[in-house]
Image (cartoon, rainbow, N blue to C red):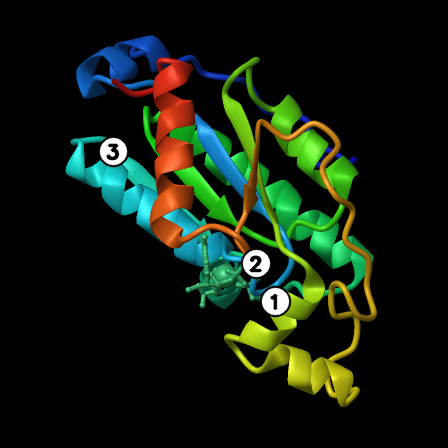
Amino acid sequence: MTDIKSKNITWHESNITKEDRERLNGHKAVVLWFTGLSGSGKSTLAHAVEQALYDKGCRTIVLDGDNIRHGLNKNLGFSPEDREENIRRIGEVARLFTQAGVIALTAFISPYRADRDNARELLNDGEFVEVYLKCAIDVCESRDVKGLYKKARAGEIKEFTGISAPYEEPLNPELVIDTAAETLEESTRKVLAYLQSREIIV
Ligand SMILES: Nc1ncnc2c1ncn2[C@@H]1O[C@H](COP(=O)(O)OP(=O)(O)OP(=O)(O)O)[C@@H](O)[C@H]1O
Ligand SMILES: [Mg+2]
């Protein structure tokens, strides 16, 4: 747990509630938390789902690992402590977006179960949708979208998830998507169907 360093701080309530914003937008505000190995399809699916939501008139944002590491989290690396802090900040940022009435889609490997559970605990029941992109490491490696597996096998990248750093599978994710077996279109439809079934979107 991160310590609170400042003492003289007071919470100021907004006049406009999350529910007011959801009514205005015509959909609920949730976090879609995509987790899985590098190359499992988090970014691809998050952006495809975002496109489908946008086409329905929903307000969305994608928080994507590499992009966030260019800015907000540029001072963090890939040690266990830095991965924890990376995910802690993303959980908080995603929560801020839900307070703004937005559907936040996060695309981070987020390998530690405890870190994902901490992000879940920031939200109310039903507001955190964990989407596990289940894909065998050999399939992810054969895709090698960014050429990272090759570098990790050559020892050029230390602490690479699935090779030299752990990935803890979700125990009770809201959704499991098998990207080795499904097309992107099928996976996108599944996520949308889930959101409709929970009346998050119409
Ligand atoms: N059903 C599917 N959903 C998502 N991606 C798929 C699917 N089927 C095949 N793919 C392919 O898998 C690859 C996934 O790459 P992507 O960059 O999205 O992975 P990632 O999980 O974001 O990895 P990283 O953690 O390195 O950012 C893409 O080439 C994509 O076209
Ligand atoms: Mg990605």
Mark pair 1, 3: CA separation? 31 Å
Q: Are marks 1 and 2 in contact (CB under 8 Å)?
A: yes
Q: Secondary structure at mark 1?
A: helix
- Ligand 1 closer than 8 Å to label 1 CB: yes
Q: Is residue 114 above or below residue 11?
A: below
- Looking at the rendered image, the quarter that the N terminus falls into is top right
Mark pair 3, 2: CA separation? 25 Å
Determine the residue located farthest toward the front in the rendered image.
181
Task: Return the residue nearer the eye: 130 or 40.
Answer: 40
Question: Which residue corresponds to mark 2?
Answer: 40
Question: Which residue corresponds to mark 1?
Answer: 140
Question: Which residue corresponds to mark 3?
Answer: 59
Mark pair 1, 2: CA separation? 6 Å
- Ligand 1 closer than 8 Å to label 2 CB: yes
Q: Residue at x 57, y 52 (%)?
A: 108
Q: Is residue 16 visible?
A: yes
Task: Return the residue nearer the eye: 95 or 127.
Answer: 127
Q: Secondary structure at mark 3?
A: loop
Q: Amino acid at mark 2?
A: Ser
Q: Is residue 165 left or right of residue 77?
A: right
Q: Amino acid at mark 3?
A: Arg
Q: Are marks 1 and 3 in contact (CB under 8 Å)?
A: no
Q: Residue at x 41, y 34 (%)?
A: 190
Q: Amino acid at mark 1?
A: Cys
Q: Is residue 180 left or right of residue 172?
A: left
